[in-house]
Image (cartoon, helix red, strand yellow):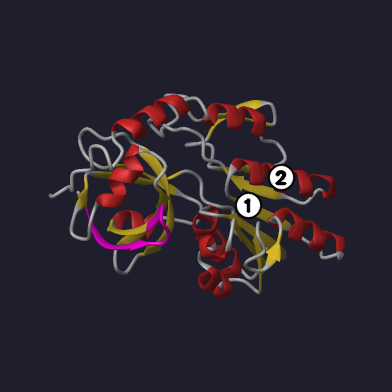
Amino acid sequence: MFKIVAKEKLSDVIYRTVVEAPKIARKRKAGQFVVVKIDEQGERIPLTISDADPEAGTISIVFQTVGYTTKQLSTLKVGDHILDIAGPMGHPTPVKNYGTVVSIGGGLGTALGRPITEALYKAGNHVIAIISARNKSLVMFEEEMRKISHELLIATDDGSAGFKGFPTQLLQKLIDEGRKIDLVVCVGPVPLMAAVSKVTKPYSIKTIVSLNPIMVDATGMCGACRVTVGGVTRFGCVDGPEFDGHQVDYDELMKRLKTYTEREQEMNQRFAPHEAGFQEVKR
C-alpha cells in the first residue's frame, strides 16, 4: 500500500500526485517509470516518475485523465492509498556531458521530461529547453524548467505565450542560426516526437525520444508494448522507454496506440463521472 501525501490539480485534466514510496525514491533515475494498480480490480498502467525525494521517501507522478483508470486515480485524496506501485522500471536516460542539449517537451511531456532535463543540466550540459502547449493556460512547469536550463523557449499554437507556432520551428531556427547541438531529447505526443526526429535527422543530430506504447505486464513477456526500432522489434518496457528517434517506426506506433480506442470510449461512456460517478477510495 502506497499512501498519497500530496495532490495538485495542474489543469482541468492533469494532476500531480506525491506518493510515499521510499525504495523507489532511492533507486529511481531520470527517464524511468512505475506501473500503478489502484485496487484489486484495477488495471496496471505505466506512469513516468516526474520527480523523487529520497530523503522524504516520496515520488511524484503527473498524469492526464484520458481513461477510466486515470480518472479514478484523480479522485484519490491525500491520505488515500494506492494498492501497488512497481518500479522503477525501464532504462534510465544515458546522462553525461554531451555539450549542448535541446530538451523538448510537448504538453504533459514537459512534466515527464523535467527530470531528464534536470539530470542533463546537473551533468554540465548547456541546456536549451523548449516547452510547448496549445495556449498559455496549458503551459506547464515554466518556472521549474527555467531553473534547470540555460535558455528557455516557449511555443504556443495561438501565440498567447512565447513563439506562435510549433517547437519544431524553434528547433529549426536554432539549427539555422548555426548553433552546435549535440543532443536533442523529446518527450511528448507521438506526432511531436516524429516531427522533431524528422527535423534533426538530416543534420545527424543524436535524438532520444521517450515512447509510450500500450503496456500490460511491463516485464517484456506479454509483447503488448512492442515497437519497431531500426527494423527490429523492441519492447518499450524492458528495452525502453527511450529509443533513437531516427530509428522508430512512428506510423506503426500510432496505429498500435489506437488498438483499444473503441473500448476506451466505451469505458469512458459507461463510467463517466456525470453518469455513474467514481466512488471515493477509502483505505
Q: Using the image as rendered, state which of residue 160 and residue 248 is in the foreground.
A: 160
Q: Residue at x 80, y 56 (%)?
A: 172
Question: Badge 1: few (under 14), some or many (20 or more) residues near its Cα, within 10 Å?
Answer: many
Q: Which mark is residue 214?
A: none
| 50 is higher (above) or lower (below) than 127 | above
**Along the horizontal axis of the image, is 34 left or right of 212?**
left
Q: Which residue is mark 1?
A: 186
Q: Check disc 2 and report its element: helix, strand or loop.
A: helix
Which range is magenta?
Answer: 2-15
Of labels 2 and 1, earlier in sequence is 1
Q: Position of residue 219 (x, y in %)?
A: 41, 32
Q: Using the image as rendered, state which of residue 258 and residue 119 is in the foreground.
A: 258
Q: Check disc 1 and report its element: helix, strand or loop.
A: strand
Q: Which residue is mark 2?
A: 195
Viewer-nearest of labels 2 and 1?
Answer: 2
| 171 is higher (above) or lower (below) than 282 | below
Q: Main secondary structure of the magenta part?
A: strand
Question: Badge 2: few (under 14), some or many (20 or more) residues near its Cα, within 10 Å?
Answer: some
Residue 244 seen by the camera = no
Q: Residue at x 17, y 47 (%)?
A: 281
Residue 227 occupies quadrant: top right
Q: Which amino acid type is marked by label 1?
A: Cys
Q: Using the image as rendered, state which of residue 161 and residue 182 is in the foreground.
A: 161
Q: Position of residue 111 (x, y in %)?
A: 49, 58
Q: Residue at x 65, y 34 (%)?
A: 250
